[in-house]
Amino acid sequence: MNKNYNLVKKYQIKSYIKVNLSLKVLKKLKTGYHNIQSLITFCNLYDTITISTINKASDVINFSGKFSKGISNNKNSITKVLKLLRIKNFLKNKKFKIEIKKNIPHGSGLGGGSSNAACLLNFLSSKMLINLRKSELKKIALKIGHDVPIMLEKKNTFLTGKKNEILRLNKSFKFDILIVYPNLVCSTKKIYLKNKKFTYIKNLSNFNIKGREKIIKYLQKEGNDLEITTTKFYPKIKKIIDFISSQNGCYFSQITGSGSACIGIFSNTKTAIYAQKLIKLKFPKYWCVVSKTI
């Protein structure tokens, strides 16, 4: 125990990633943002957040791990959560030591920062006895970022396309997913500004597709509207997608979110691991992992 911080008790929480299995860009809103329709799942890959209360005048926040480079200790999704809760006078005089081990690349479309914020919100609401209602949690989360409300629950999620409407699905996909990160940080703002592919969908209220084969066929058809723009800016992403798609057992491959991480959905773990070995030979400098949906 580090006596400089007078640690009361350490808690460790897992901050899981999300993957956009499909993404359709709908009409542009007056705010300048776009509504999207997207099927989202969560994988068993995560950052770890260690938190404890301290007797200090201010919070102590540190990022470590392979993907911590470039993240400010003073301005990030964690500090935004603390600031918003203090504005509402929820945390009173409590200060925290928070250590985030970044196992997941930021700027990859995997929602790492949003997941960190959502996990901290949930933790503080329960352990600090704030006991915020779901509606209040969602409002605070939305002020931090558009993906943060999605990350409040680790359930497969369908974004209907209606403003801020989230539909949680009581079903498990059990997908084997290969993820490749090509050491690029894509600018989400730039991708959306330059995107010229839009989808006009009338029925946005539900997701009733059942059965693994039907869901895969649906996803193969849907794709990701942002992929054309992203691969235009970053041609090497297209090479990765094409290489993943060519592997035995791959149902389809695309980017997640606006990139830069590329995903491949495989028929089973064995084919995914074999593809991973080939990708590591072809792209030895890229981060490449096999994961399962949760």
Image (spheres, rainbow, N blue to C red):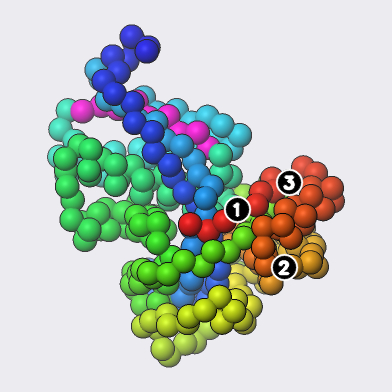
Label 2 or label 3, whichever lies nearer to me, is 2
Q: Residues within 10 Å of mark 2 (few under 14, many from 20)?
A: many
Residue at the spot of label 1: 291
Q: Position of residue 131 (x, y in %)?
A: 17, 47
Q: Position of residue 173 (x, y in %)?
A: 51, 67
Q: How many marks?
A: 3
Residue at the spot of label 2: 250
Magenta stretch: give its range. 94-102
Does the rendering let one see residue 134? yes
Which numbered disc flags the more N-terminal residue, 2 or 3? Answer: 2
Residue 222, label in figure: none
Q: Are marks 2 and 3 in contact (CB under 8 Å)?
A: no
- Label 3, secondary structure: give it: loop
Q: CA distance from mark 1 to mark 2?
A: 14 Å
Image quarter hosting the N terminus: top left
Q: CA distance from mark 1 to mark 3?
A: 16 Å
Residue 286, label in figure: 3
Residue occupying the point 35% across, 72% down = 167
44 over 194 or under it: above or below: above
Q: Amino acid at mark 1?
A: Ser
Q: Amino acid at mark 2?
A: Cys
Q: Position of residue 71 (x, y in %)?
A: 51, 36
Q: Nearer the viewer, residue 215 or 39?
A: 215
Residue occupying the point 80% across, 44% down = 284
Q: Position of residue 226 (x, y in %)?
A: 60, 70
Which numbered disc flags the more N-terminal residue, 1 or 3? Answer: 3
35 over 148 or under it: above or below: below
